[in-house]
Image (spheres, rainbow, N blue to C red):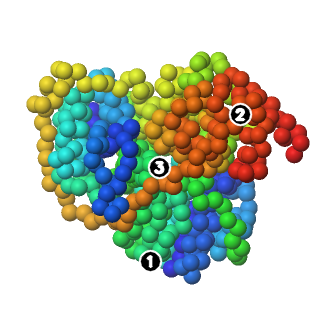
């Protein structure tokens, strides 16, 4: 038996989500007393050997020069699982991970448990806790199949260092040409901004900002903190901010270490998307805003007064630390 | 263009979520059910395709008879006909098997789904269906253009956007961006009246196992009371974020 882990790379580089998935898989493998076999696909600029630090017993590198293809990536992971008697396969729930996991579950005839937020409670059978009802609830899922794919919510479990050998070897897999998928034509990267799902600090604002041109104070605070910017649904619907910033039940669900909400009342749909944040700060003129009930820290006050002061206070704090 | 739109019957976004039977079941008491919002973007996009280039829009749902009001709403919005696969949607694999079997019997050119349902949020059914059919699949789709027999799609990737293309058929799992919030259609009286006479076929489920089981539910731990900080003393907030919360 073994645990197979997909170590995703972005233009050759690993990210925190990669290390989190590897260390998650390695810790489960330790419990099961089996090797943790890590798989990378495509050319790497980072060193595959570096995954040893997060618990890779062995890292298998797959040469692949084409664009992303969910079916082929799934097939490669399935081949490694078959070759190594892999009963559990771990992927991170990134945008690509979400496309690979269902294909993989079908190809590997495996049960799929997505949105896992903790290590399995049991490994035989696999029982793992995941979020449901847009994080308004949690559920303990059990796999009824001999093989299981777990997809974890990025930044939910955290990265752990688990020393292991991590020897690197090339794969013995083939890209199955009979699998049908979309052909990637173009990739546009937003440069200079922290992608929201990966951000550890997020500054978010809502209708309380009154007009899109007032976002400069939000941007300044975010820049000072090194945070990503986000917004509420109404603000994205009326076009004050781009859709990719909309966090909430039908937008992006995030779980940063710090979420600062400015001028957002905290409707239940908004909370569903951000309640997994580790620390929540709410700034609102209305002391009765429901968001204060979900917050760790709150300031009752006008954003146009409080936010610039907060930016200055962060600047002062940084100068002294 | 023969389009299938898959819809889920889910609690309204404002619903408070509670569990019953010793925390082993979702408590539907007092809960208003709606078309899954992600699916509604897909339904609207499907209607646009039909209006532009002709064809038909069929909606499919895997559910017991309780989902019929939700299916009728999809018909009132403008779908031509509906199929309800008569089964309790116990897990994603089971549902994907049902929908794949339906697709195999009918020559749909494109299947449009939401990227996830807002109840169980698995985000699994569209991808599993595509894998069962060996059809191209895109998740988190925010743009869809059809030209002849080819589809060009846009999806969010980590830190950007990706545009890709395929020959149909294909499975699209979409979200806002397929259409905008303002484009969603509210059924009018005429729509509601005609929906009553549109065909809603009930189809028996095919044999399929489920792969997962929910043992129990619980709710996230509630937060301790908020610490209010005076607006004249924001430095105190910075101190707490550093020393107490340890997030900066």
Circle 1 crowding by C-alpha within 10 Å: few under 14, some 14–19, many from 20: few
Give the side of residue B210 with respect to residue A62, left or right: left
Q: Tag 3: Cα neighbours inside 10 Å, few (<14), some, or many (≥20)?
A: many
Residue at image position (73%, 57%) is: A46
Q: Secondary structure at mark 2?
A: loop
Tag of residue B230:
2
Disc 2 and disc 3 in contact, CB within 8 angstroms: no
Q: Residue furthest bottom?
A: A33
Depth-wise, is mark 2 or mark 3 nearer the camera? 2
Q: For the residue carrying disc 2, how many other residues have a C-alpha within 10 Å: few (<14), some (14-19), or many (20+)?
A: some
Identified at 74% across, 46% down, the residue is B240
Residue A135 numbered tag: 3
Please report the residue visible at 43 percent of the width from the left and 53 percent of the height from the top.
A137
> SS at mark 3?
loop
Q: Which mark is residue A124?
A: 1
Placement of A39 over or under B178, stated as above or below: below
Quadrant occupied by the C terminus of chain A: top right
Residue at image point 58% right, 68% down: A25
Q: Is residue B152 visible?
A: no
Q: Nearer the viewer, residue B117 or B128?
A: B117
Is label 1 or label 2 in front? Answer: 2
| Residue with the most extreme right position | A320
Q: Earlier in the sequence, mark 1 or mark 3?
A: 1
Q: CA distance from mark 1 to mark 2?
A: 52 Å
């Amino acid at each position: 038996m073994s645990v197979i882990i997909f170590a995703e790379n972005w233009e050759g580089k690993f990210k925190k989500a990669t290390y989190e998935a590897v260390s998650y898989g390695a810790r489960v493998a330790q419990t099961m007393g089996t090797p943790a076999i890590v798989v990378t696909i495509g050319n790497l600029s980072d060193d595959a050997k570096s995954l040893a630090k997060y618990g890779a017993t062995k890292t298998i590198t797959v040469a692949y020069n084409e664009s992303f293809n969910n079916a082929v990536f799934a097939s490669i992971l399935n081949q490694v699982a078959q070759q190594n008697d892999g009963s559990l396969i771990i992927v991170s729930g990134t945008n690509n991970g979400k496309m690979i996991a269902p294909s993989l579950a079908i190809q590997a005839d495996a049960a799929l448990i997505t949105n896992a937020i903790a290590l399995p409670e049991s490994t035989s059978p696999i029982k793992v806790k995941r979020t449901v009802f847009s994080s308004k609830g949690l559920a303990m899922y059990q796999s009824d199949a001999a093989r299981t794919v777990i997809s974890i919510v990025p930044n939910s479990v955290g990265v752990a260092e688990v020393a292991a050998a991590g020897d690197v070897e090339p794969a013995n897999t083939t890209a199955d040409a009979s699998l049908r998928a979309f052909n990637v034509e173009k990739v546009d990267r937003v440069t200079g901004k922290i992608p929201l799902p990966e951000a550890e600090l997020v500054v978010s604002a809502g209708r309380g900002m009154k007009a899109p041109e007032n976002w400069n104070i939000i941007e300044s605070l975010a820049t000072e903190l090194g945070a990503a910017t986000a917004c509420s649904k109404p603000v994205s619907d009326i076009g004050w901010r781009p859709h990719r910033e909309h966090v909430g039940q039908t937008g992006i669900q995030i779980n940063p270490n710090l979420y600062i909400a400015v001028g957002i009342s905290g409707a239940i749909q908004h909370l569903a998307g951000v309640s997994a944040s580790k620390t929540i700060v709410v700034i609102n003129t209305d002391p009765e805003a429901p968001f204060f009930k979900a917050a760790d820290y709150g300031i009752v006050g006008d954003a146009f007064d409080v936010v610039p002061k907060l930016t200055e206070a962060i600047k002062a704090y940084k100068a002294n630390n | 263009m023969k389009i299938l739109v898959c819809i889920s019957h889910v609690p309204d976004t404002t619903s408070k979520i509670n569990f019953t039977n010793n925390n082993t079941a979702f408590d539907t008491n007092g809960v208003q059910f709606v078309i899954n919002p992600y699916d509604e973007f897909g339904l609207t996009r499907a209607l646009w395709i039909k209006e532009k280039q002709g064809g038909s829009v069929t909606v499919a749902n895997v559910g017991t008879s309780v989902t019929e009001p939700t299916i009728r709403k999809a018909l009132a919005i403008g779908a031509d006909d509906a199929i309800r696969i008569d089964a309790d949607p116990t897990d994603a694999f089971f549902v994907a098997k049902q929908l794949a079997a339906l697709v195999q019997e009918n020559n749909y050119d494109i299947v449009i789904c939401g990227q996830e349902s807002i109840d169980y949020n698995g985000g699994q059914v569209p991808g599993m269906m595509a894998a069962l059919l060996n059809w191209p699949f895109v998740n988190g789709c925010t743009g869809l253009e059809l030209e002849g027999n080819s589809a060009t799609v846009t999806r969010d990737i980590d830190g950007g956007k990706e545009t890709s293309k395929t020959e149909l058929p294909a499975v699209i799992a979409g979200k806002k961006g397929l259409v905008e919030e303002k484009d969603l259609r509210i059924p009018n009286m005429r729509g509601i009246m005609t929906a009553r006479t549109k065909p809603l076929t009930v189809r028996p489920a095919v044999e399929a196992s489920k792969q997962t089981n929910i043992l129990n539910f619980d709710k996230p731990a509630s937060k301790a009371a908020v610490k209010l900080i005076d607006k004249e003393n924001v430095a105190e907030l910075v101190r707490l974020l550093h020393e107490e919360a340890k997030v900066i």
